[in-house]
């Protein structure tokens, strides 16, 4: 057994995951594309201990509700079953950004948990296997396992649904600037929202057009065509939120400031500042620009009264940052 600490980034989806073909296995209705983010991440330490009578879960700086704790315990149980062990675990986890506000905290959280816990349980899993396992905890967590720009294959079975790296972090000098405008956890979680998605009359048309959209954005990514890339990610973000807003019941994640930023971005492009927005399931806005325009975009956001921004570059996926190995009598760092 080991005590292991892992770090995993949140990711921003350019082609979104909203709606599932299998709820239990968290199989998405469509492929999705994302970028791992350098400055929003989760650090998780897992230690399996013989003397524990139940799993101990602690999130630094935040109180976990019973539902969140159960998801973590269920994921630990998957890992125990794979490792053929019965030992309970102590888990300490910390986000460096607000949880439950549409910045993919479950993605970074379950990716870090998956890597730390499987390593602590002495499992030797491939990146593909880690991605499949992370997906079962939180769908988008599978995209936080591989590096850089990633694609999540929807698949028709658990073994066929995983994420892999399309390009390394240094493929393209683009920046994701997150405008933090809401830090209160959303009332309806993404997991609950996925269940509602098919009640929207826009759900099926969005899914039916997905293959063509993915083909175009992959070509734009390959060619580093920023204008085409930006147009697609904006269209996709609006399409996903149209599904949310027309589900039953309707989900409105945006705040007035969200809309203000959307309109401002359109104005900024008119003055020759190439920047595009995308928004996950929350009010916070991700502004995507080229590296050379990062400072201008940041200043524009500040001029709108946005007090907190997080600047991200493409980054590596989940990785181990420390291991303490036990030989029965002593521990040593590995």
Image (cartoon, helix red, strand yellow):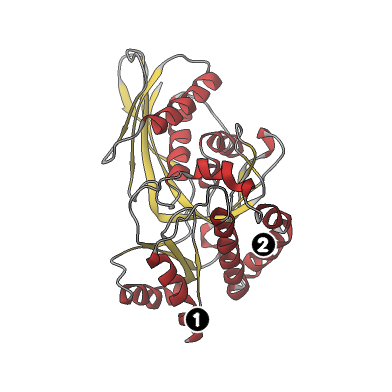
Q: Quadrant of the C terminus?
A: top left
Vertical position of residue 82 compared to residue 4: above or below? above
User: Can you tell which quarter of the image residue 211 is in?
Assistant: bottom right
Asked if residue 64 is positioned above or below residue 207 in the image, the reply reads above
Q: Residue at x 49, y 47 (%)?
A: 317
First in sequence: mark 2 vs mark 1: 2
Element marked by disc 1? helix
* Front of the two marks 2 and 1: 1
Q: Nearer the viewer, residue 29 or 242?
A: 242
> Which quarter of the rendering shows the N terminus?
top left
**Residue that lies at the very extreme toward the left in this rendered image:** 61
The spot of residue 69 in percent (x, y) is 39, 30
Determine the CA span between mark 2 and mark 1. Answer: 23 Å
Residue occupied by mark 1: 269
Location of residue 119 in the rendering, given as x and y in whole percent from the top left corner? 46, 29
Measured along the vertical axis of the image, is residue 200 above or below residue 226? above
Residue 243 locus on image (x, y percent):
59, 55
Image side of residue 231 versus residue 93, left or right: right
Evaluate whether residue 288 shows in this view.
Answer: yes
Callout 2: few (<14), some (14-19), or many (20+) C-alpha neighbours within 10 Å?
some
Q: Is residue 17 above or below residue 217?
A: above
Q: Which x, y percent locates residue 248?
A: 56, 48
Q: Report the disc number at residue 218.
A: 2
Which one is in front, 108 or 23?
23
**Residue at the image point whose x is 51% and y is 34% from the top:** 137
């Amino acid at each position: 057994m080991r005590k292991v600490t892992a770090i995993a980034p949140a990711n921003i989806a350019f082609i979104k995951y909203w709606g599932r073909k299998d709820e239990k296995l968290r199989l998405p209705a469509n492929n999705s594309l994302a970028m791992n983010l350098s400055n929003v991440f989760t650090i998780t330490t897992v230690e399996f201990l013989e003397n524990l009578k139940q799993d101990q879960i602690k999130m630094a700086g935040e109180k976990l509700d019973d539902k969140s704790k159960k998801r973590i315990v269920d994921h630990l149980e998957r890992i125990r079953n794979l490792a053929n062990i019965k030992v309970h675990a102590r888990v300490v986890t910390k986000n460096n950004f607000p949880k439950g506000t549409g910045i993919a905290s479950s993605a970074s959280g379950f990716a870090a948990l998956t890597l730390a816990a499987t390593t602590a349980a002495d499992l030797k899993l491939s990146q593909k296997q880690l991605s499949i396992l992370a997906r079962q905890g939180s769908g988008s967590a599978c995209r936080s396992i591989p590096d850089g720009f990633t694609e999540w294959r929807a698949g028709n079975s658990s073994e066929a649904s995983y994420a892999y790296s399309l390009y390394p972090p240094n493929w393209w000098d683009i920046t994701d600037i997150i405008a933090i405008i809401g830090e209160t956890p959303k009332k309806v979680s993404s997991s609950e929202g996925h269940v509602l998605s098919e009640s929207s009359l826009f759900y099926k048309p969005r899914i039916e057009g997905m293959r063509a959209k993915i083909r175009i954005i992959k070509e734009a990514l390959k060619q580093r065509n920023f204008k085409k890339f930006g147009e697609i990610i904006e269209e996709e973000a609006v399409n996903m939120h149209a599904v949310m807003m027309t589900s039953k019941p309707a989900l409105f994640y945006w705040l007035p400031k969200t809309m203000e930023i959307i309109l401002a971005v359109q104005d900024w492009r008119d003055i020759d500042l190439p920047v595009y927005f995308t928004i996950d399931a929350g009010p916070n806005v991700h502004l995507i620009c080229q590296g050379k325009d990062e400072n201008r975009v940041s200043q524009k956001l500040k001029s709108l009264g946005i007090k907190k921004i997080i600047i991200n570059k493409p980054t590596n996926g989940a990785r181990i940052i420390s291991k303490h190995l036990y030989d029965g009598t002593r521990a040593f760092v590995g």
